Amino acid sequence: MKNQPKSSHYLDLIIVLFLKEMKVRYKSTSLGYLWSILHPLSFAFVFFIAFKVVMRIQMEHYTLFLITGLFPWQWFANSVSTAPMTFLGNASIIKKVNFPRNILPFAAVLQDMAHFLFSLPVIVVFMLFYGKSPGLSWLYGIPLLLAIQFLITYGMALIVSSVNLFFRDLERLTGIALTLLFYFTPVVYAESMVPEKYRSLIYLNPLASLMINWRNLLLNGALDPRHLTVSIVYGLVIFGLGSAVYKKLSWKFGEVI
Amino acid sequence: MNTPVITFRNVTKNYTLYHGLTGGFKNFLFRLPKAIKQIRDSKYCVLKEISFEVNSGETVGIIGRNGAGKSTLLGLMAGVLSPSSGTVEVKGKVAPLLELGGGFHPDLTGIDNIILNGVLLGLSRKEVAHKISAIIKFADLGGYITQPIRTYSSGMLARLGFSVAAHLEPEIILLDEVLAVGDADFQKKCMNKILEFKQSGVTIVFISHSMDSVREICDRAIWIEDHRVKMTGDAVTVTKAYQSCN
Ligand SMILES: Nc1ncnc2c1ncn2[C@@H]1O[C@H](COP(=O)(O)OP(=O)(O)OP(=O)(O)O)[C@@H](O)[C@H]1O
Ligand SMILES: [Mg+2]
């Protein structure tokens, strides 16, 4: 009763949906690249003005500090904030063909991950400008953190995109939640600036350990094993949760969409 | 060849009515017990314990009034809807449901839609690439094939959809009133293609409000009314009975 694809066919499906997403979102590929860099850079600019120029934060290379946190954050935020529309925007496909629908959020998150990867050279340029250079640890560190962030992001995207079909106002809630999460995550400030008595609360934030490690890796070429473990656990839990929610709801997609 | 490729056994389809939820999260949370009860209770039964079979190579017409549940039936066959109880068994490669306002994404070009369509159906990208020129030729949309499909008329969309389905070598084709919007020329082309399909043993399920086309194309017809199969049998007999009833 279904066109269950073989694994080689999964790849074709992902490629085609990936390219489709690219076209639909950015209309053209070259401009898409520009957006993926301009967006986090403009954010970095705003925070630079607010915290460095106006509030005079005590930190050297604050620009570099900002973008090494903001770029990976943007990937997460983009994926999750567009997730409510992932299934809705593909309503006509879902109503016509039976295929594994989770490929849609998968391709969408992959898309944002690709944009993040494309933006890494920008970080390198800034590093060179400040007299730093990429370390060898990037070779294993980047794939590792990519995998963890993919698990977390895809899991969240599955939850948000599935549930949004049943509660259409989830989109607004997602926006609010993302903003809150952003300020609770050490992205524009360092975790060392959080008052000691609150610092352990950071572990309650599923994104914090990951973002701390991104910055650690990109700036200093190091990974904190404790934060690494925490983020892997969050990755597995959120991915598991997302898969469960998807599994529970997906059979109804065709009729509620 | 009398092997059934589509088998419905005691299929019941209820739609849950989500009016309790359209109020959004806030309403839902503040009236949780009531909202849950409402979801439980507000079911709308479209099809009730329906059983029938469609044999391999058969062309079957589905007829019935607006809202009788014809599209629901087709959705169950396509596997995009799940039955509330009973089982639906479909053997073979099913072409994407063809219905009015076809096409997959308004911003994609005709060609992009063809590729997406083919891969979703189960072909590899390579196979689609081989067939694409034949599809473009059959659709006969001229320069519009490279334009986003939001610029298409509904007839053009039907042409695109039918052309794709026709060339992807599906074993089962599901048509929901698509031919109605094609012009005479294209309708004839489709008819020919459908006859060609019949000859090569493709199974076709066809929803239509035009009794003439049902009689022309179909071997058999199924009349859906009051949540059940009211009548099934030879296309001419069933359509006549349906017409005399209205
Ligand atoms: N997703 C849905 N959620 C709730 N109710 C639905 C849904 N889809 C269809 N219905 C209801 O189910 C009934 C059957 O709908 P369906 O689309 O199958 O009818 P149909 O026979 O195809 O009608 P038509 O000839 O107008 O196309 C209708 O009363 C419709 O309101
Ligand atoms: Mg219908």
Image (cartoon, grey):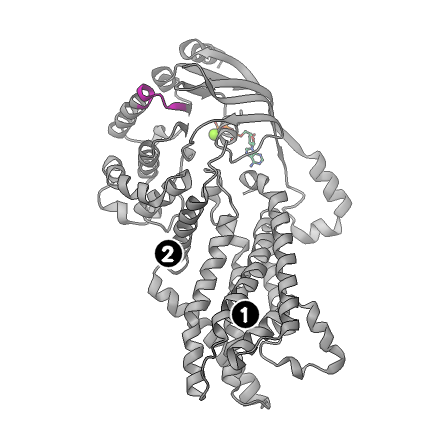
In terms of image quadrants, where is residue A227?
Answer: bottom right
Residue A165 picture location, percent across and down: 58, 47
Q: What residue span does the magenta drawing correspond to?
A: B197-204
**Residue at x 65% of width, y 48% of height:** B23
Cβ of mark 1 under 8 Å from ligand 1: the answer is no
* Residue B226 seen in this snapshot: no
- Tell me the tag on residue A73: 1
User: CB atoms at circles 1 and 2 under 8 Å apart?
Assistant: no
Q: Are marks 1 and 2 on the same chain?
A: yes
Q: Dot 1: few (<14), some (14–19), or many (≥20) neighbours within 10 Å?
A: many
Residue kind at label 2, given as amino acid type: Lys
**Residue at x 27% of width, y 23% of height:** B192
Q: Determine which residue is flagged by label 2.
A: A23
In terms of image quadrants, where is residue A214?
Answer: bottom right
Q: Is residue B123 left or right of residue A247?
A: left
Task: Judge by depth and name the residue closer to the eye, B221 or B124.
Answer: B124
Q: Quadrant of the C terminus of chain A?
A: top right
Task: Judge by depth and name the residue closer to the eye, B61 or B30.
Answer: B61
Q: Chain of mark 1?
A: A
Residue B191 picture location, percent across and down: 29, 23
**A100 over A216 or under it: above or below:** above
Label 1 sits on a secondary structure element that is helix
Give the CA separation, mark 1 to mark 2: 23 Å
Residue kind at label 1, given as amino acid type: Trp
Residue B22 picture location, percent across and down: 63, 46
